[in-house]
Image (cartoon, rainbow, N blue to C red):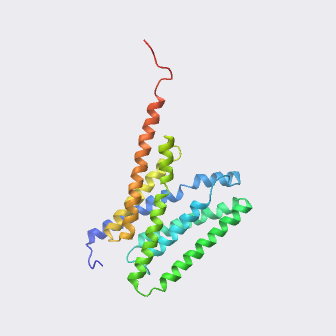
Amino acid sequence: MIDYIPNSTLTCKDAAGIAGNIFAFGLFVSPIPTFRRIIRNRSTEQFSGLPYIYALLNCLICLWYGTPLISNDNVMVATVNSIGAVFQLAYIILFIVYAEKAIKVRVFGLLLAVFGLFAIIVTGSLQITDGNIRWITVGLLSCISLISMFASPLFIINLVIRTKSVEFMPFYLSLSTFLMSTSFLLYGILNFDAFVYVPNGIGSILGITQLALYFYYKKKSTEDSREPLIEPYA
């Protein structure tokens, strides 16, 4: 452990954490248009509730990691994931309200499973008396959870390359992902916490990839639209 951290480093770390919380808000509110449509149509249509279930589990695990019972001075990790958990839970409740009965029962069952699994993780980790081993155990769980969450856009990246269209990859969602990941990458580095900077480093790389693909295919589609429909012949 680091016994002394300069005040300038602490200030930069806190600034990075606050920035990460702000940019994360962009991710948390991104499903609002979807749920406006669900509420307006009073139906979940073909939308899936699984992304919100998984996002809730990820937020809960990372929230637990950020608490003083597990890791030292990770309050920004705890705050961003507590806010994220509230948003995801609200989305899941709305999804259950407007879903068909069969889907409603399945999603509610998954929600109970998430809380059950989280309770097992909390109870199990508290049984570990060695604080360092507890930190490593929960840290690995949070790291794996974050990496798998950041890896989920790989499907969208593949779709963009295959269709040569950015229709299914919203720019501001990709930008928010990149900015949040980069902020927490810096936060983790300045806090000497590999369980924070490793997954967010991967998230930053994937965020850059998404933005690069967005600008490449957006520019390409613009250039293609400017081509004349009939080639002039002399």
The C terminus lies in quadrant: top left
Identify which residue is drawn at 46% across, 65% down: 146
Q: Which of 6 and 95 is in front in this view?
A: 95
Taking the view exactly as shown, the residue that stands out farthest to the bottom is: 129
Please determine whether, in this image, residue 195 is positioned above or below residue 180: below
Horizontal and vertical percent for residue 158? 48, 48
Of 153 and 40, nearer the camera is: 153
Residue at point 48%, 86% (across, down): 127
- Residue 49 seen: yes
- Where residue 148 appears, as percent x and y from the top left, is 48, 63
Q: In this view, does 168 lie to the left or right of 178?
A: right
Count numbered badges in the picture.
Answer: 0
Give the residue furthest to the right.
Answer: 101
Residue depicted at 41% across the width and 62% down the height: 20
User: Where's residue 132, x and y in %?
Assistant: 38, 82
Residue at x 66%, y 69% (from the top left corner) = 109
Residue 94 rendering spot, x and y as whole percentages: 65, 61
Quarter of the figure that contains the N terminus: bottom left
Is residue 131 shown above or below 94?
Answer: below
When the figure is inspected, residue 32 is found, relative to residue 136, above or below; the finding is above
